[in-house]
Image (tube, grey):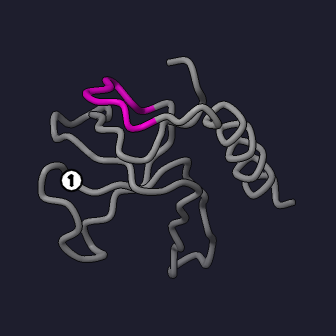
Amino acid sequence: MEEKYLPIGTVVTIEGTEKTIVIVGYGAYDYNKTIKTTEIYDYCGYPYPEGFCGDEYTIVFNHDVISEIKYKGYTPDTYEQVNKEISQIIENAKNGK
C-alpha cells in the first residue's frame, strides 16, 4: 500500500473477516466506559454495501489489519498532501499531543 491512509470511499477487508468495509472517516476513537480510556484508530467504516445502519455497526480499525483493498476511493491531485496532514494529525493524537 502506497499511502498510510487510504481515501474515503475505499472498500477493504480486514483480518479475521471476509465482510467488506467502506472507509468513511479518519482518526476514529473508541471510548471504553469501564476503564475510562479512549483509543484512537486510523479509520472508521461501515459494512459494505449496507452502509450506515446505526452507531452500533460502526467499525473502527487500524491500517495494519487491512488484508485486501477491494476498491480505492477517489484521489485528487492534492491527496498526497492531504495524506501527510492526516498522518500527522492522527499520530499526534495517538501520542497525546
Residue 59 point in image, percent of width and height: 34, 57
Residue 35 locus on image (x, y percent):
58, 75
Which of the 4 image quarters holds residue 52? bottom left
Instruction: Determine whether 81 is above or below 39 in the image.
Output: above
The residue wearing badge 1 is 47
Residue 97 horizontal/vertical position (percent): 87, 60
Q: Nearer the viewer, residue 87 or 77?
A: 77
The answer to which quarter of the image holds residue 37 is: bottom right
- Find the magenta span and give its range: 65-74
Q: Amino acid at mark 1?
A: Pro
Which element is circle 1 on? Answer: strand
Categorize mark 1 by other alpha carbons within 10 Å: few (<14), some (14-19), many (20+). some
* Left or right of residue 15: residue 37: right
For the point 35% across and 39% down, which residue is it? 10
Seen as rendered, the residue at the extreme left is 50
User: Quarter-wise, where is residue 74 in the image?
Assistant: top left
Asked if 83 appears above or below 54 in the picture, the reply is above
